[in-house]
Amino acid sequence: MLREAVRIFVVDDDEIYVARLAHYLSLNPDYQVKKFYSAKTLSLALYEKPDVITLDYSLPDVKGDALLNQVKEISPETQVIIISGQEDIKVAIDLFKKGVHDYIVKDADTEQRLWMAIQNLKETLALKKEVEDLKQEVERKYNFQNIIIGNSDAIKKVFRLMEKAAETNITVSITGETGTGKELVAKAIHFNSERKKKSFVPVNVAAIPKELLESELFGHEKGAFTGAASRRIGKFEEAHNGTLFLDEIGEMDINLQAKLLRALQEKEVSRIGSNEIIKINARIIVATHRNLKEEIAKGNFREDLYYRLLGLPIDLPPLRKRENDIMLIAKYFVDQFCKENGLGKKRLSFNAKHKLMSYSFPGNIREIKSVIELACVMAEGEEIIEDDLQLNISSPKNISSPNGNYTLKEYTLKLIQQYLDEYNYDVLAVADKLNVGKSTIYRMINNDQLKIVKKKQDA
Amino acid sequence: MPEPEALYNIDALLQAHDKDFEFEKHIIFLFLKNIPETGLKLENACKEGDWKMVAFYAHKLKASIDLFNLNPLKTIIRNIEIKAKIPVLEADKDCINEHINFISAYIEKCTCAMKKDYSL
């Protein structure tokens, strides 16, 4: 690809033309020009992989075809511009089919046209490079290790399943609470699979009115219905050879489910208003926060579609079940946000960490991310303290997911212990929060052996 | 009386190259070095009846004839290139030969003029 200077090889057995073109191109200080008078000398220098070769197609020592093939083989990214005395349009068309960038006839304006061609080429190559860089960035971004932070057993299991999914074309069904990263997992599977060069097409079923969803998925022909002013390609077609991600599949209208089932079974679609059958090769990934079996029982979801979509199920654990990961994730978001916003290095104080660990994060990753980002903004100095963390305190960890058969007394003790931990054993604050007298709490501390290990200072 | 047309004209070329005198001298030097030689090769190919090479050298000369604006030769050289590519008729052979002699003579006149113009 293009470096700072554009390296151009001018090749012609006509010394006058070489001198003419080389001199003209050298007027641009960004162009580094080398002259060649035969195919043989050019062949020896092809390993230098120039950005552009201007080539006389009728060199006496090697046929133009063979030379062009050699260039494409040794330096495939080099762009070839043919400079020829041949004014035959058929020759030019053949050469374009062989992949030459431009064809310029030798005449009074050759230099100017060559100059323009190289300028255009420079812009095209710069754009191409930008696209390549962005593609690489996306691949890096969706690398499994970059996309999901954590080393808990629950998340390691998810990694293993994602790897298996990426290796094949199996349909994947992702379940998990809101904010657990279902779309990110779908993207990671796509960008780590052989389909990564093709499109990842996300469709949020819940976000599209049910009347429009059919057209969105399958496309329509002009005039297929009122308002169909032009032909529209559906998401299935867009995802051909790539991945179609149907988010919130549980929200799909039961009538449309039948059409979706047919498309998945037959691997073909037809646009609304058309009889044409279009073969589709798309990997399907679906996600939902609903329990689809329950939806089947309620008659909201087709059982046959459920089994067609089940494929490889990946259940994303909620954050509260990934205890070891909370701090890793929090640190990752602190570092990322501070870096992106030029805030310098920040760290979580001991109490801040404790506060995070005591919270259930009903909004999962999405919630911890926004909590951390706000904390980074609110924090004074390098340390994020517990007051910087704006948590929805009505969701302490064990309240939202009571498990075990506690008595009312045990449950009350557990609740108070949790708040004591959270408020650094500030009895007055806990009493105020729970709207009970402070003596009630002291009594429980004395009689029921609640733990008081007040931290003197943050770690 | 109108001025006779110059044998060659590289004004447009020099204009495009910022009237670089070093480039001008170099391009004249390359003309003197290459064009008479290619003209001779064209003559020899014609004498030997090697029409493929006649077409080849005509094609090579065409670009320089256009570049130096050797106006009387522009149509002639194209005719030679075309006629030499297809099976050459007996009647055309003499005509091609005559054209090539004219080209050689013209190139000779040009080289003399250039040597004089550039004191070479």
Image: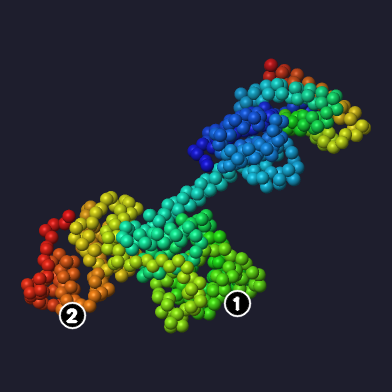
Please, which chain is the residue tagged with disc 1 on? Answer: A
Q: Residues within 10 Å of mark 1 (few under 14, many from 20)?
A: few
Q: Is residue A342 above or below residue A417?
A: above
Residue A438 visible to an observer of this rendering: no
Q: Quadrant of residue A413?
A: bottom left
Q: Quadrant of residue A450?
A: bottom left
Question: What residue is rendered at 83% in x and 28% in y?
Answer: B50
Residue sitting at x 15%, y 78%: A409
Secondary structure beneath label 1? loop
Left or right position of A385 against B33: left
Of the pair A433 and A218, the residue shown nearer to us: A218
Helix, strand or loop at mark 2: helix
Q: Name the image quarter holding residue A322.
A: bottom left
Label at residue A236: none
**In this view, A248 is above or below A60:** below
Task: Decide if residue A166 is on the left or right side of residue A434.
Answer: right
On what subunit does the disc labeled 2 rest?
A
Which of A157 and B83 lies nearest the eye of the viewer? A157
What type is the residue that disc 1 sits on?
Answer: Thr
Return the x and y of residue B47 as percentages of the image width and height. 85, 24
One can see residue B16 in this view: yes
Q: Position of residue A176 (x, y in %)?
A: 38, 69
Percent position (x, y) of residue A174?
42, 67
| Residue under label 2 | A408
Residue at (68, 47) in percent of width and height: A97
Residue linked to disc 1: A226
Residue at 50% in and 75% down: A305
Which amino acid lies under the numbered mark 2 shown in the image of this protein? Leu
How far apart are the two marked residues, 2 and 1, measured between alpha carbons?
62 Å
Single out the mark in the foreground, 2 or 1. 2
